[in-house]
Image: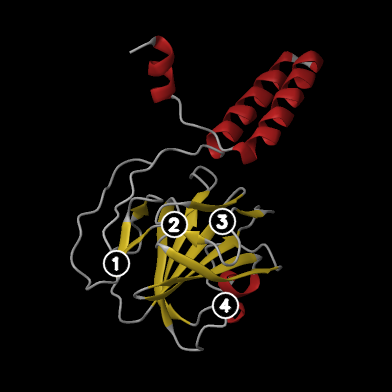
Amino acid sequence: MSLVDSVRKVIVPIHKEGYVFIAIGLGATIVLANLWSPFGWIGAIITIWICYFFRDPIRITPQREGLVISPADGRVSQIASALPPPELNLPAEPMTRVSIFMNVFDCHVNRAPVPGRVVKMAYTPGLFLNAELDKASDDNERNALAIETPAGIVGVVQIAGLIARRIVPFVKEGDSIATGERFGLIRFGSRVDVYLPTSVIPLVGEGQTAIAGETVLADMSGNEAVKRAFRGI
């Protein structure tokens, strides 16, 4: 193995959405360093954090039929019964909502929890409350998707957080997506809600750390117990 290949295996890829912010950080660092060297060090640290924030690591996604995989890195902040967002045009009946909170140090590239077709996609402007608050599901800026699968429709909602100011979608209504496929990104702290049929029993618990594209949230084919990974993000 060459030195270049070895370095590539160690360095985590950066999503292209972060390139412009990294360039701004580098430019600001040069300007600050010319003003006063300690400012330059501060700029360099912020630029390194920006690189870390926009990382896009490779994930190995379980592909067994019926599995619902975590769409986000972060902490399972809540599992509750809740009505799905009205903009998805789903029946006004409670569904099981699994909420995953992403802090500013989590990877913010979101991945499809199930394979299927995006039958509905709706962006809703709103507030920028703390994403951990329950009312953030209703009041905050969000982008909601309804994914049709053979086992039923799964709702996925990207919710902007306290300092998040942009939800970037990678898919559109009518697209077909595979489990683990990247479908969007939220900038700087946020939350993702997954809405499951009430008959589906979650296989995670509140407080657990989830890994996008890898951690199994539920099994829609029969709720069979599935071994889950608990490694660092």
- Residues at circles 3 and 1 in contact by the CB criterion of under 8 Å: no
**Mark 4 or mark 3: whose residue is earlier in sequence:** 4
Q: Residues within 10 Å of mark 3 (few under 14, many from 20)?
A: many
Looking at the image, the residue that sits furthest to the top is 3
Rounded to the nearest whole Å, what is the CA distance between mark 3 and mark 1? 27 Å
202 or 178, which is in the foreground? Answer: 178
Foreground: 100 or 62? 62
Q: Residues within 10 Å of mark 2 (few under 14, many from 20)?
A: many
User: What's the distance in space between the residues labelled 2 and 1, CA to CA?
Assistant: 15 Å
Determine contact: label 4, label 3, CB under 8 Å: no
Are dots 4 and 1 in contact, CB under 8 Å? no
Q: Are marks 3 and 2 in contact (CB under 8 Å)?
A: no
Is 114 left, or right, of 16 in this rendering? left
Q: Residue at x 24, y 53 (%)?
A: 228
> Residue 114: percent from the left, percent from the top?
39, 63
Q: Which residue is mark 1?
A: 66
**Which residue is disc 3 drawn over?**
190
Q: Which mark is residue 71?
A: 2
Where's residue 119, x and y in %? Answer: 54, 72
Residue 205 position within the rendered picture, expressed as x and y whole percent measured from the top left: 30, 64
In terms of depth relative to the viewer, which is nearer, 157 or 98? 157
Q: Which image quarter is the C terminus in?
A: top left
Kind of residue at disc 3: Ser
Q: Earlier in the sequence, mark 2 or mark 4?
A: 2
**Mark 4, other Cα within 10 Å: few <14 / some 14–19 / many ≥20:** some
Locate residue 42: give its quadrant: top right
Residue highlighted by disc 4? 88
Question: Going 75% across and 18% down the picture, which residue do you hit?
Answer: 30
Which amino acid lies under the numbered mark 4 shown in the image of this protein?
A: Leu
